């Protein structure tokens, strides 16, 4: 009985560790979208968080394979969302002036 409980606890710890270690592998959209692949509208403020939120709410246009992949990656994206919020907050001193310079209209997406 004690062995079974120990095995279950170990399995849970390994699962949590696997999910937490896989979160960085999902690729933080904040870094990618802020510095490498900037959005068309020029609005860099919380761009990674907005992208992750779109993925979590299935607002992105994808084919059936992409929807299944998003469904399987949903827990990893959910873990990565707070990390993207933190990264986007740290990038605000860069993204605010860059967005103003790009002439973005700061409109909230519906």
Image: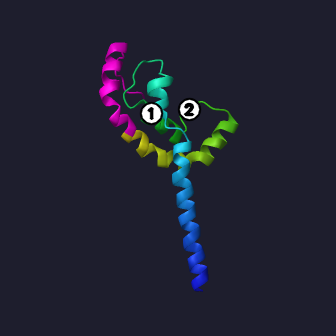
What is the magenta segment's predominant secondary structure?
helix
The quarter of the picture where residue 92 lies is top left
Specify whether residue 103 is in view. Answer: no
Give the left or right position of residue 19, taking residue 96 as reference.
right
Neighbours of disc 1 within 10 Å: few (<14), some (14-19), many (20+): many
The quarter of the picture where residue 91 lies is top left
Please provide percent x and percent y for residue 62.
63, 32
Please provide percent x and percent y for residue 16.
53, 60
The circle drawn on residue 88 is none
Read off the magenta span: 87-110
Q: Is residue 39 above or below residue 4?
A: above
The circle drawn on residue 30 is 1
Q: How many marks?
A: 2
SS of the residue at dot 1?
helix
Residue 47 in the magenta stretch? The answer is no
* Residue at 53% from the left image edge and 58% from the top image edge: 17
* Residue at 36% from the left image edge and 23% from the top image edge: 107
Front residue of 103/24: it is 24
Q: Which residue is mark 2?
A: 60
Report the quarter where the C terminus lies.
top left
């Amino acid at each position: 009985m004690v062995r079974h409980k120990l095995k279950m606890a170990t399995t849970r710890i390994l699962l949590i560790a696997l999910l937490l270690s896989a979160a960085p592998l999902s690729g933080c959209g904040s870094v990618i979208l802020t510095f490498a692949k900037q959005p068309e509208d020029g609005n860099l403020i919380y761009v990674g968080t907005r992208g992750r939120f779109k993925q979590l709410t299935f607002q992105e246009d994808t084919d059936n394979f992409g929807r299944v992949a998003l469904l399987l990656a949903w827990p990893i994206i959910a873990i990565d969302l707070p990390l993207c919020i933190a990264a986007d907050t740290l990038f605000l001193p860069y993204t605010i002036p860059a967005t103003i310079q790009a002439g973005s209209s700061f409109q909230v997406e519906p």
